[in-house]
Image: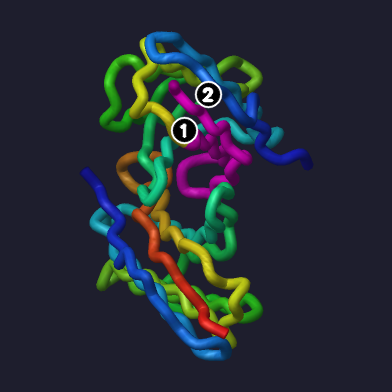
Amino acid sequence: QKEVEQNSGPLSVPEGAIASLNCTYSDRGSQSFFWYRQYSGKSPELIMFIYSNGDKEDGRFTAQLNKASQYVSLLIRDSQPSDSATYLCAGGGGSQGNLIFGKGTKLSVKP
Amino acid sequence: KAGVTQTPRYLIKTRGQQVTLSCSPISGHRSVSWYQQTPGQGLQFLFEYFSETQRNKGNFPGRFSGRQFSNSRSEMNVSTLELGDSALYLCASSERGDRPAFFGQGTRLTVV
């Protein structure tokens, strides 16, 4: 069974700090990776995707992919209380065919 | 483009009954996946359909079934409901398995 692993947290950071969320995956065939944000009681919302090794930046968010280490990360700069949510990592394009989700990391940004 | 639409949004059923949930994907998306989410739990994968064929199935009992129609709309059925089936059921659509999946707002099922 292919898996995506995330530290469940909670991860607590002060407002304005950098939040670093990490994820590892077991399916070497996975080609694409996604980060979703889920507020309590709501459905997951796509915030970033990355297909190639290296960094991809979008506003305050940076996704990093290292296929050799099977490692994906999401950095949130200048964290805001509104960033407090559960962040889900997902891998796609592997042998299973559909996206495989990690269990999520709960982030809390303290004012 | 309209997003993923799930109906109904809320549902209350009695133990032993059955329920059918519906998901209309984004236009052009042929892949529809279903997930169960209970409080404090991650997304539990139920199954995925692509062009009317079930491609993958998670570790759920046979009481959980689904299907996909030629217009890519999908339905999920749960028979002989149990209290433990109370959850948020989410569906997500994508163009294909390596592309972003977009979620509907979910159906919150309560079994009493």
Residues B74 and B43: in front is B43
Q: Chain of mark 1?
A: B
Position of residue B88 measured from the top left corner of the image (x, y, whole percent): 49, 37
Q: Is residue B112 above or below residue A39?
A: above
* Viewer-side residue, B48 vs B61: B61
Find out whether residue B95 is within the magenta segment: yes
Residue B74 appears in the rendering = no
Marker count (numbered): 2
Q: Is residue B3 left or right of residue A46?
A: right
Against A2, residue A19 (above or below) is below
Reading the image, the residue beneath label 2 is B51
Residue stretch rendered in magenta on the structure: B88-112
Dot 2 amino acid type: Ser
Tags 1 and 2 both on a single chain: yes
Looking at marks 1 and 2 on the same chain, the residue that comes earlier in the sequence is marked by: 1
* Residue at mark 1: B34
Mark 1 element type = strand
Disc 1 or disc 2, which is closer to the eye?
Answer: 1
Task: Give me the residue at 57% from left, 32% from top.
Answer: B107
Q: What secondary structure is found at the residue carrying circle 2?
A: loop
B7 sits left or right of A54 in the view: right
What residue occupies the far right of the structure in this picture? Answer: B1
Label 2: how many residues lie within 10 Å, few (<14), some (14-19) or many (20+)?
Answer: some
